Image: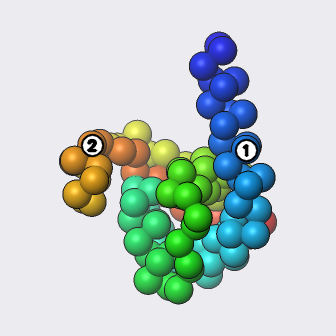
Amino acid sequence: PEAEVAKEAALAEVVANNREWMTKAVEAFNRLHLETGTGEDFRLALGEAGLEQPRKPHAWGALINLLVKRGALHATGEMRPMLSKVANGRKTFVYRRMRAEAA
């Protein structure tokens, strides 16, 4: 599917353009004690743990995607509404941490 290829290319570009931040984010994730949550939950927990904000907010989605690809997070099949005002209650996946480190 062409759309999936385009999505993967866009995510790879976001990761490449934010490589230093992604490295810090994965390191911070490895220290995080949150076991389950939405991408938003992980974003908030990482921010509370001291991770700086990326230059572009799309980097958060790319980070979650990277963690899923590395086997560190797995979608549970459950969906929850997001809490931030800008998300307008949009539903998003809940993830479970599958291993302690994302490598």
**Does residue 57 appear to the left or right of 80 in the view shown?**
right
Of residues 7 and 71, the one nearer the viewer is: 7
In this picture, residue 53 sits left or right of residue 91 = right
In the rendered image, which residue does mark 2 sit on? Answer: 90
Residue positioned 40% across, 60% down in the render: 40
Q: Residue at x 67, y 49 (%)?
A: 14
Mark found first going from the N terminus, 2 or 1: 1
User: At 36% across and 45% down in the image, what residue appears?
Assistant: 92
User: Can you tell which of label 2 and label 1 is closer to the viewer?
Assistant: 1
Q: Secondary structure at mark 2?
A: loop
Going by the picture, which residue comes out furthest to the front? 55
Residue 78 falls left or right of residue 95 = left
Residue 12: x %, y % from top left: 73, 43
Q: Residues within 10 Å of mark 2 (few under 14, many from 20)?
A: few
The secondary structure type at the circle numbered 1 is: helix
Residue 93, given in percent of the width and then of the height, sits at 40, 45
Asked whether disc 2 touches disc 1, contact meaning CB atoms under 8 Å apart, the reply is no
Expressed as whole percent of the image width and height from the top left, the position of residue 30 reads: 65, 75
Residue found 29% across the figure and 42% down from its top: 91
Residue 101 appears in the figure? no
Q: Examine the rendered structure and indicate whether residue 61 appears above or below residue 103.
A: above
- Whole-percent x, y for residue 74 in the image: 55, 49
Question: Pointer 1: what residue?
Answer: 13
Please tell me in which quadrant of the rendered image residue 55 appears: bottom right
Quadrant (top left, top right, bottom left, bottom right) of the C terminus: bottom right
